Image (cartoon, rainbow, N blue to C red):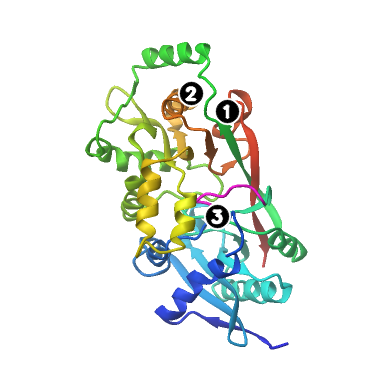
C-alpha cells in the first residue's frame, strides 16, 4: 500500500479539491448535504473577515494521486482571549475509513498548534458559532440540514480511540408542526406582551425586515455570550452573515419581539427546508443549482429552526414562548409537516422547551472533542 502524504493546500486548484472531497466521499450517502462551492470559498479565503483575528491552515492527505482526507487547523485568537485558553481548532475534517489517515491529519493540526504555543486541541469547529460545528454521536442515519455537519460513526470511533474527551454536547429535535398552540400558552403570551409593553413584529416585505438584520445578530451576541466557546461576531462578520442568511428567510418565519423602544429582545428565525435542493445542486449554483434552491424557497413542507434566543435582560420571563407560538401558528397556516431544530446545547433554556411544551422527538445528539497537547 502506498504511503500517506500530507500536503498543505497551496493554490486555488488544491482548495477546490479540498472543498469537493466530501462530495466524493459521501456521494452515496442519502443524508449528506453538499455545501455550495461559493460559500466554502468565502469561508476559506481572505474574503472571510474572521481571518482578521484567526490563523488558518488547510491540508490534504494523499495516497498516491488519490485524496483520502482533508483537515483545517484554526487558531481563533478572539476565542482564546475571551475564554482564557490556548486552543487550536480542527475543522473541515473528513477522511476515509482508515485510522492511519485520520491520525496523520489530526497530528498535523496538533503539531501546528504546538508550533504556535497552543496547549489544547478541540473541534470540529469553524471560525464562529455560525459556521458548521460538532459531530453526530447519536442518530447517525437521521436527517441533516444545510447548516450542520455530516459524519459517519467511524469518525467517533477513531477520535475516541485517540483519547479525546467530550466537553460539551448538543441536541436536535424533530417537531410535528401541526400541533396546535395550547390555549393556555396563547393567553399567557398575551399577558406577557401587555405586561412588558412588547410587540411581536409582522413583516409584509423584505424591505421591512432588513432594518432588523444587524439588531438580530447583535441580539445573538448578547443571548449566546455565555455558551461554550462563543465569542461575539464582529461588524464585518455580521455583514457576511446577513448576506448569507437573510435572502433565504420566509417573512412569516422571521418572528422578532421588540420592546417599546424597538430594541430586539427575542428572536426566532426559520428557513424553508433546502436539503433536497442543495443535494440536487451538488455544490454549485450553476448551471441549474439555483433553480432547485429558488423552487425550494417557495414550495416546502418542512422548516429548519435556524436560530432563536432571548436577550439576557429578558430571560426567565417567558418571552421565548411568544416567538415559538408564532412560528407554530405560521407552520399550521402553511401546512408545514415537520420543524427541525438546529443543534442546541443540552440543558439550556432554548433546548428545554422541546421537552416541556411541545411533542418533540429526539433527532440526534452532537459533541465536540478536546485533548490536551
Circle 3 — which element?
Answer: loop
Q: What residue sits 32% from the left and 39% below the top?
A: 215
Question: Considering only vertical position in the picture, is 116 above or below 218?
Answer: below
Residues at badges 3 and 2 in contact (C-beta under 8 Å)?
no
Residue at which label 2 appears: 321
Q: Badge 2: few (under 14), some or many (20 or more) residues near its Cα, within 10 Å?
A: some
Residue at which label 1 appears: 353
Which region shows up in magenta?
A: 141-148
Residue 254 lies within the magenta run: no
Majority SS type along the magenta span: loop
Q: How far apart are labels 3 and 2 at the CA level?
A: 27 Å
Task: Kindly indicate the quadrant of the structure image that contains residue 203.
Answer: top left
The numbered disc on residue 133 is 3
Residue that sits furthest to the right in the current view: 161
- Rendering coords of residue 362 (x, y %): 65, 37
Residue 142 lies within the magenta run: yes
- Rendering coords of residue 148 (x, y %): 53, 52
Q: How far apart are labels 2 and 1 at the CA level?
A: 9 Å
Q: What residue sits 47% from the left and 60% below the top?
A: 35
Q: Quadrant of the N terminus?
A: bottom right
Q: How far apart are labels 1 and 3 at the CA level?
A: 22 Å
Residues at badges 2 and 1 in contact (C-beta under 8 Å)?
yes
Q: Badge 3: few (under 14), some or many (20 or more) residues near its Cα, within 10 Å?
A: many
| Sooner in the amino-acid sequence: mark 3 or mark 2 | 3
Q: Badge 1: few (under 14), some or many (20 or more) residues near its Cα, within 10 Å?
A: some
The numbered disc on residue 115 is none
Task: Please give left or right for residue 278 compared with residue 153 in the image.
Answer: left
Circle 1 — which element?
Answer: helix
Residue that sits furthest to the left in the current view: 207
Task: Kindly indicate the quadrant of the structure image that contains residue 85.
Answer: bottom right
Task: Please give left or right for residue 180 compared with residue 241 in the image.
Answer: right
Amino acid at each position: 500500500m502506498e504511503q500517506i502524504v500530507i500536503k498543505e493546500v497551496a493554490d486555488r486548484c488544491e482548495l477546490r479539491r479540498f472543498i469537493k472531497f466530501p462530495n466524493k466521499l459521501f456521494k452515496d450517502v442519502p443524508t449528506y448535504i453538499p455545501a455550495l462551492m461559493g460559500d466554502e470559498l468565502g469561508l476559506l479565503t481572505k474574503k472571510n473577515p474572521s481571518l482578521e483575528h484567526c490563523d488558518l491552515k488547510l491540508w490534504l492527505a494523499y495516497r498516491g494521486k488519490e485524496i483520502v482526507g482533508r483537515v483545517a487547523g484554526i487558531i481563533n485568537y478572539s476565542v482564546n482571549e475571551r475564554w482564557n485558553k490556548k486552543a487550536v481548532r480542527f475543522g473541515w475534517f473528513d477522511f476515509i475509513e482508515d485510522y492511519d489517515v485520520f491520525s496523520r491529519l489530526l497530528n498535523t493540526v496538533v503539531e501546528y498548534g504546538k508550533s504556535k504555543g497552543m496547549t489544547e486541541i478541540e473541534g470540529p469547529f469553524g471560525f464562529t458559532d455560525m459556521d458548521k460545528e460538532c459531530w453526530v454521536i447519536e442518530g447517525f442515519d437521521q436527517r441533516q440540514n444545510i447548516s450542520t455537519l455530516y459524519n459517519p460513526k467511524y469518525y467517533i470511533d477513531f477520535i475516541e480511540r485517540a483519547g479525546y474527551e467530550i466537553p460539551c454536547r448538543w441536541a436536535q429535535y424533530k417537531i410535528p408542526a401541526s400541533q396546535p398552540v395550547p390555549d393556555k400558552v396563547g393567553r399567557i403570551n398575551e399577558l406577557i406582551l401587555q405586561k412588558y409593553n412588547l410587540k411581536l413584529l409582522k413583516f409584509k416585505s423584505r424591505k421591512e425586515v432588513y432594518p432588523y438584520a444587524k439588531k438580530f445578530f447583535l441580539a445573538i451576541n448578547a443571548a449566546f455570550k455565555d455558551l461554550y466557546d462563543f465569542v461575539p461576531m464582529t461588524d464585518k462578520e455580521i455583514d457576511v452573515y446577513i448576506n448569507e442568511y437573510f435572502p433565504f428567510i420566509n417573512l412569516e418565519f422571521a418572528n422578532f419581539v421588540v420592546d417599546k423602544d424597538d430594541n430586539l429582545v427575542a428572536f426566532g428565525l426559520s428557513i424553508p427546508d433546502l436539503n433536497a435542493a442543495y443535494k440536487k445542486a451538488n455544490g454549485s449554483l450553476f448551471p441549474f443549482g439555483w433553480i432547485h434552491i429558488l423552487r425550494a424557497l417557495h414550495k416546502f413542507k418542512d422548516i429548519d429552526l435556524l436560530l432563536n434566543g432571548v436577550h439576557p435582560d429578558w430571560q426567565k420571563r417567558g418571552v421565548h414562548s411568544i416567538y415559538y407560538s408564532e412560528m407554530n401558528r405560521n407552520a399550521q397556516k402553511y401546512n408545514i409537516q415537520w420543524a427541525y431544530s438546529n443543534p442546541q446545547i443540552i440543558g439550556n433554556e432554548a433546548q428545554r422547551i422541546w421537552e416541556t411544551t411541545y411533542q418533540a422527538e429526539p433527532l440526534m445528539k452532537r459533541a465536540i472533542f478536546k485533548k490536551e497537547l
